[in-house]
């Protein structure tokens, strides 16, 4: 059995806790490895390694830190196919999707390479007579990252490139469901010249996480995962004096106005709802057509398209499938339970993915694309995050009703509107209580040089991931007010060379 361990101080370290979690290949249903779950003591060792490395790394020039990241970027590109295969073999997503997430992660590395510019402070001369004021953006110390299963490369890369570029050291705690990718990234960071201890990976579960949230050497915690855990992370780490950004779950709605380009909207929905088997925090899980006629046209086109959705293993010879399996057997059961719940709640099950015949499914955790119609607020399949390939049509009578439905929802991660009307789009952008909004763009994920984050219970903490918020999150500002009374300049006539 393949064993997956930790990466501390520039080398692989075998876990000693004797606790393990199974890692599966979701496309075959076979266990491919077991991952060591760190004890509290082992987690403290990872923090100690990062803490020790901070003294030197924080004083290394920003240019030098950036150059290591440039090398890291080149190495990740060189190994992109290998890493994408690793992602697919533990997560299940199709190869092109795995390459896509790596690209989005690399864009954050590219952004972080600009750190000599990004970390410049502000300077004002003569804020008073002969008084200058300036600020420094200093690193915090040891930062921790805790990531979910659904983006094993991209989400860690939302965090550590900027943290390291700013001069911090890092302890990463990946999802125990697909832990191999962050370990491979750690090796490539070392190969790029990152000093030992600056980036460490500790695998584990709640026992390891709780140490990261409470140990006084950890200064900041970045978390991405489900809302109940995000809330726990935020409450616990902040009460221990740490800076926290904790991104949670989502239920993203896409409004289709009667004048929206239907073909474009349906193509967009197929990718946004079913891509990566719906296991994306920015997946569209609710389509909101405005007006009965729009709803009927949308429904008919979706049914036809669902017939052509290719579901199968993520790693195949030849063209990709559209969608791979779910991540675990338990998650597959959970998604099937939600489909049963939707039927009990009175929604109309239009296409049932449980019935889809999938060639090459074997014992993999596959399910076909599912479509519900006549879903209403109050139903659990509308209020809760399913995180699977299940799209709900929730019909709205008007633009205002669509906006109210979205604004009343617990989550506020992403949303989109499809329309040809500038006024409707403008009103939508202004009124909607959601952090990331697309206009004729289904998955409005901000680029690395902008910041990523939702509203309401999709994000706990004031600062979003990457972009300028990322740099602010991983630095502490110090403002210096400075005055130099006249001295040697006016005394030059009296200056004498010291002699022995
Ligand atoms: P999860 O909350 O189960 O796990 C996330 C991390 O928390 C993992 O590293 C896990 O080991 C750890 N964890 C789990 N239970 C814990 C506990 N009781 N105490 C301490 N740590 C614990 O999430 P997941 O299933 O891996 O990921 C899917 C979720 O992540 C979805 O809800 C999805 O919406 C969300 N997500 C959100 C975003 C975003 O940007 N808002 C991005 C990606 C994923």
Image (spheres, helix red, strand yellow):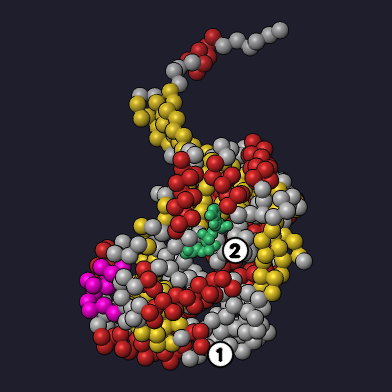
Q: Which secondary structure lies at badge 1?
A: loop
The boundaries of the magenta stretch are 395-407
Calculate the distance from the C-alpha at mark 2 to the C-alpha at mark 1: 29 Å
* Label 1 beta carbon less than 8 Å to ligand 1: no
Looking at this view, name the residue that lies furthest to the top: 500
Q: Earlier in the sequence, mark 2 or mark 1?
A: 2
Q: In this orientation, which residue lies closer to the viewer: 128 or 227?
A: 227
Q: Where is residue 474 in the image (x, y as percent from the top left)?
A: 51, 45
Answer few, some or many: residues within 10 Å of disc 1's Cα (few below 14, many 20 plus, some between 14 and 19): few
Q: Is residue 404 magenta?
A: yes
Q: Position of residue 81 (x, y in %)?
A: 67, 71
Quarter holding the N terminus is bottom right
In the picture of the structure, the residue carrying the numbered disc 2 is 152
Compared to residue 218, the image places residue 363 above or below, namely below
Residue 368 in view of the camera: yes
Identity of the residue drawn at 37% across and 62% down: 411
Q: Which secondary structure lies at badge 2?
A: loop
Q: Does the magenta stretch include residue 313?
A: no
Does the residue at mark 2 contact the one at mark 1 (Cβ under 8 Å)?
no
Compared to residue 88, the image places residue 436 above or below, namely above
Q: Which mark is residue 478?
A: none
Q: In this orientation, which residue lies closer to the viewer: 389 or 323?
A: 389
Q: Position of residue 438 (x, y in %)?
A: 37, 69
Q: Is residue 496 left or right of residue 187?
A: left
Compared to residue 17, the image places residue 391 above or below, namely below
Q: In this orientation, which residue lies closer to the viewer: 210 or 497?
A: 210
Picture quadrant of residue 123: top left
Identity of the residue drawn at 26% across and 63% down: 431
In the picture of the structure, the residue carrying the numbered disc 1 is 357
Residue 68 in view of the camera: no
């Amino acid at each position: 059995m393949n064993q997956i361990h930790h990466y501390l101080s520039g080398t692989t370290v075998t876990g000693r806790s004797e606790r393990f979690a199974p890692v599966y290949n979701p496309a075959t249903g076979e266990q491919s490895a077991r991952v060591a779950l760190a004890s509290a003591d082992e987690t403290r060792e990872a923090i100690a390694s990062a803490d020790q490395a901070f003294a030197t790394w924080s004083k290394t020039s920003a240019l030098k830190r950036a150059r290591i990241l440039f090398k890291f970027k080149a190495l990740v590109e060189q190994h992109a196919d290998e890493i994408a295969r690793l992602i697919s073999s533990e997560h299940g997503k199709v190869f092109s999707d795995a390459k896509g997430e790596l690209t989005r992660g690399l864009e954050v590395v590219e952004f972080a390479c600009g750190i000599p510019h990004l970390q410049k402070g502000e300077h004002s001369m003569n804020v008073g007579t002969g008084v200058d004021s300036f600020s420094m953006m200093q690193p915090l110390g040891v930062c921790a990252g805790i990531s979910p299963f659904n983006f094993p490369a991209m989400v860690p890369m939302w965090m550590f490139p900027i943290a390291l570029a700013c001069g911090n050291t890092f302890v990463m705690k990946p999802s125990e469901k697909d832990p191999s990718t962050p370990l491979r990234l750690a090796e490539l960071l070392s190969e790029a010249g990152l000093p030992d201890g600056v980036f460490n990976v500790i695998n584990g579960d709640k026992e390891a996480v709780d140490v990261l949230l409470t140990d006084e050497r950890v200064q900041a915690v970045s978390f991405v995962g489900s809302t109940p855990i995000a809330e726990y992370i935020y409450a616990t780490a902040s009460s221990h004096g740490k800076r926290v950004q904790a991104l949670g779950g989502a239920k993203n709605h896409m409004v289709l106005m009667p004048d929206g380009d239907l073909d474009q909207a349906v193509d967009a929905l197929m990718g946004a709802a079913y891509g990566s088997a719906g296991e994306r925090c920015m997946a569209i899980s609710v389509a909101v057509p405005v007006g009965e006629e729009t709803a009927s046209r949308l429904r008919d086109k979706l049914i036809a398209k669902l017939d052509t959705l290719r579901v199968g293993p993520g790693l195949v010879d030849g063209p990709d499938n559209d969608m791979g399996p779910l991540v675990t057997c338990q998650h597959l059961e959970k998604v099937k339970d939600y489909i049963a719940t939707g039927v009990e709640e009175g929604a109309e099950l239009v296409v049932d993915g449980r019935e889809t015949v999938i060639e090459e499914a074997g014992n993999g955790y596959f399910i076909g694309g599912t479509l519900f119609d006549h879903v209403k607020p109050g139903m659990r399949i509308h209020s809760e995050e399913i995180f699977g390939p299940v799209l709900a049509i929730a019909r709205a009578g008007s633009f205002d009703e669509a906006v109210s439905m979205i604004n009343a929802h617990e989550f506020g991660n992403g949303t989109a509107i499809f329309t040809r009307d500038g006024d409707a789009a403008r009103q939508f952008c202004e009124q909607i209580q959601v952090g990331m909004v697309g206009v004729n763009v289904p998955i409005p994920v901000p680029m690395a040089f902008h910041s990523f984050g939702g509203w309401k219970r999709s994000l706990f903490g004031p600062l979003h991931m990457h972009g300028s918020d990322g740099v602010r999150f991983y630095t502490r500002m110090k403002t210096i007010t400075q005055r130099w009374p006249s001295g040697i300049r006016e005394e030059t006539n009296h200056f004498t060379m010291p002699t022995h």
